[in-house]
Amino acid sequence: MSPASKSHLVPDPITSLNLPDLADYAAVAVSTRGRLIAEPGSPTRSDFQRDRDRIIHSDAFRRLMHKTQVFVHNEGDHYRTRLTHTIEVGQIARALARALNVDQDLAEALALVHDFGHTPFGHAGERVLNEALKQFGGFDHNAQSLRIVTHLERRYAGFDGLNLCWETLEGLVKHNGPLTDRDGDGLEGPVPSAIAEYDADNSLDLWSWPSVEAQCAAIADDIAYDNHDLDDGLRAGLFALDDLANVPLSGALLAQVRQLHPRLDDSRTTHELVRRQITVMVEDVIRESLGRIESAAPVSAQAIRDLDYAIVSFSPQMEEQEKNLKAFLFRKMYRHPRVMQPVEAAQTILGDLYRVFWEGSALMPDDRQWSLEGLDDLARATRIADYLAGMTDRYAVAEHQRLFDHTPELG
């Protein structure tokens, strides 16, 4: 085929994006506050779409596949991992953003990045690093997420990190609400150093609420883990369907399913319960949030930030029911011996690794990014924590087996 005959296969350059008309209070990609390192825009994707894509293609995103949500990796193939949890959060966040007529791509990006900073072995690993770094301000997984996307990812020629938009970084750091008052004082103690240092160079308005999109991602996280932990707990046999009778929301929905399908097996009953519960919770958030939006009448994304309360929320009734469900899961699942048993082993593994790297810097990877040479104690501790926090569960086990004669069994 000659060059002339092939030319019709090459599309004309796209000069404008076919973006939906969003609500006045939505974050607007074409009006983003920009990236720390200026880059030319894309003719085919909005800046928020590019952020989402960079997040998906990152090393940190792939590592979520082998990081613990509740059950460690050797428990079975069908329990949630950090990755499957993250994908479920993304789906719910998009549904909420669509209903509230805000930017779905930004909401999804924030859902997909929200767990980047989690350690191997879930909260057990975080406790180890927090204790190890106590004299340096401790370890915070949200601050670690920021370090990953602004510093630790090494993929692009022109910068470290992912060089995400201001709105994405803001939502990542503040998805659970403001970190400081307007005077800069931390609302729950000192602001983690990684966040404070970045904010000094590129202020994220730590005193304000984040965008509607960020709030959608935050509450989607609650809805997702409430429901998939219920599903996983039932699948694992940590509790039975009948145990839900005194959990107001779940018990009522279970009764409804059993009335409609009296001969349904437990597996399908569980799925029917969980999917109905997700729907009820999502629809409650949409109703409550639309009511709050109508009352506040925000005319811009900044007007959302200037409010002194969350605009995306459960109703008071659903908030109480959700707390009851969390309390049930805490009693029956998160403190169940089968879930707690691997915790001691996991803490031993990560604690041993921290100590051996601190005492023998030559045991760190032979890579300039991880060298401890010439570092003061704070920088040394931070670099070791960066390395450990980035590990998957099975890589942490393999490293322990490489460096120690005996490695505790996770289960």
Image: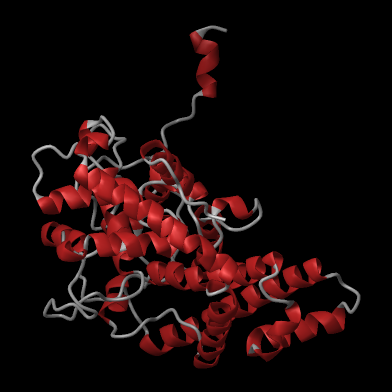
In the rendered image of this protein, does residue 399 appear above or below residue 98?
Answer: above
Where in the figure is residue 342, as x and y percent of width and height? 51, 60
Image quadrant where one finds the C terminus: bottom right
Residue 16 visible? The answer is no
Residue 188: x percent and y percent? Answer: 24, 79
Residue ID at (36%, 53%): 350
Q: Is residue 43 above or below residue 393?
A: above
User: Residue reaching furthest top?
Assistant: 2
Q: Position of residue 192 (x, y in %)?
A: 21, 66
Relative placement, left or right, of 226 versus 152 is right
Going 55% across and 87% down the picture, which residue do you hit? 324
In the picture shown, does residue 272 fall above or below 160? below
Most distant residue in the front direction: 405
Residue lying at 31% horizontally and 35% vertically, measured from the top left: 155
User: Based on the displayed image, in which of its 4 quarters is residue 71 positioned?
Assistant: bottom right
Residue 160 in picture, x, y percent from top left:
23, 41
Count the numbered circles shown. Answer: 0
Taking the view exactly as shown, the residue that stands out farthest to the right is: 263
Q: How is the image coloured?
A: secondary structure
Q: Tell me what residue is drawn at x 89 percent, y 79 percent.
A: 262
Choose top left, top right, bottom left or bottom right for residue 84.
bottom right
Does residue 156 appear left or right of residue 399 in this picture? Answer: left
Residue 9 lies, with reference to residue 48, above or below; the image says above
Judge from the rendering whether residue 85 lies leftward or rightward of residue 55; answer left or right.
right
Quarter containing the N terminus = top right
- Comparing 23 with 112, the one in front is 112
Answer whether residue 354 is visible to the viewer in this image: yes
Q: Is residue 213 left or right of residue 161?
A: right
Where is residue 125, by image quadrant?
Answer: bottom left
